[in-house]
Amino acid sequence: MMTISDPVACIAAAPASAGLFLDFDGVLADISSVSDGAVVRPAVPELLLRLNERLGRVAIISGRPVDYLHEMIPTEVDIVGLYGLEWRSNGVIRSLPEAEAWRDTIDSLTAVAVAQFGSAPVEHKGLSLTVHYRSDNGQAAAMSDWVEQQAAELGLEARAAKQSFELHPPIARNKGTAILDMADSLDPVVFVGDDLGDLPAFDGLDELASRGVTTFRVVVESDESPREMLDRADVIVSGPAGAEAMLRRLVESLG
Ligand SMILES: [Mg+2]
């Protein structure tokens, strides 16, 4: 185990065995008020590509469907979508068969959600469903109740996310299990996130740390940062611009 307190220096000391995992929204893309509006910052794809060439493993781990990220992230860089229900590896997109069994249920439920809340706040993610209250805070309580009720009736799992609630197939996958699936023999391991859905990734890092792996929990801070995230941060950077600056510093330090 190394005792360097800066993730960039730590990765630069052992790039070939380093794992760098990143959330997308609020980390590599500025948060947008519309559900389908997060666009990768222009310099990020090239930085990811260069890091992917040098590091043991680089992957995006997102609550977004892989389809959404597919064109914005270079094919060489792996993507885990829907918190691990689907992924793109070496350019090939796959999903968990047990999650696929829920696709029709999610399709029907999307129609019900649109009838209830209108189409604008409803985001159909294929194997999961999100309802957003960002544009109308007054809807939050009704959405929370509706999501809890559907979860109970259909056997889905309800999750809180940034200004939204999500319904997922009841499959024990999250950003933490995604990291543990990919982190085999990596050291150090860094995860960069900004939101509640990223807390399980920190749990994953804790599990790795308990095995002696050097880990870094990097939080991208905004004026909406959940307290629980900041409390667990090893390093805090300011906004997606700060995350991009960290990636650039890492590329430069690798020469
Ligand atoms: Mg995020």
Image: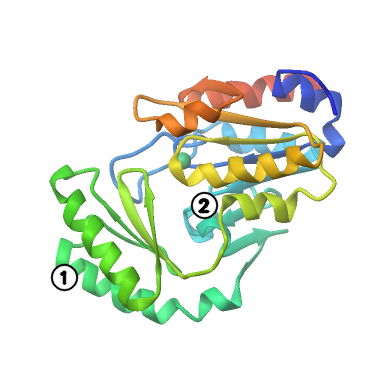
Position in image of residue 167 (x %, y %): 38, 64
In the image: residue 124, left or right of residue 18 = left
Left or right of 29, for residue 183: right
x, y percent for residue 146? 23, 64
Q: Do callouts 2 and 1 mark residues in contact (Cβ within 8 Å)?
A: no
Identity of the residue drawn at 54% across and 21% down: 236
Q: Is mark 2 within 8 Å of ligand 1?
A: no
Counting other residues with Cα less than 10 Å from the Cα at mark 1, is it few (<14), some (14-19), or many (20 or more)?
A: few
Q: Position of residue 170 (x, y in %)?
A: 48, 70
Residue under the image location 35 percent in, 24 percent down: 223
**Mark 1 is on which residue type?**
Ala
For this view, does 117 lie left or right of residue 168?
A: left
Residue picked out by circle 1: 115
Residue carrying label 2: 69
Residue at 64% in and 54% down: 178
Residue 4 spot, x, y in % from top left: 78, 18
- As drawn, the residue found furthest toward the front would be 210
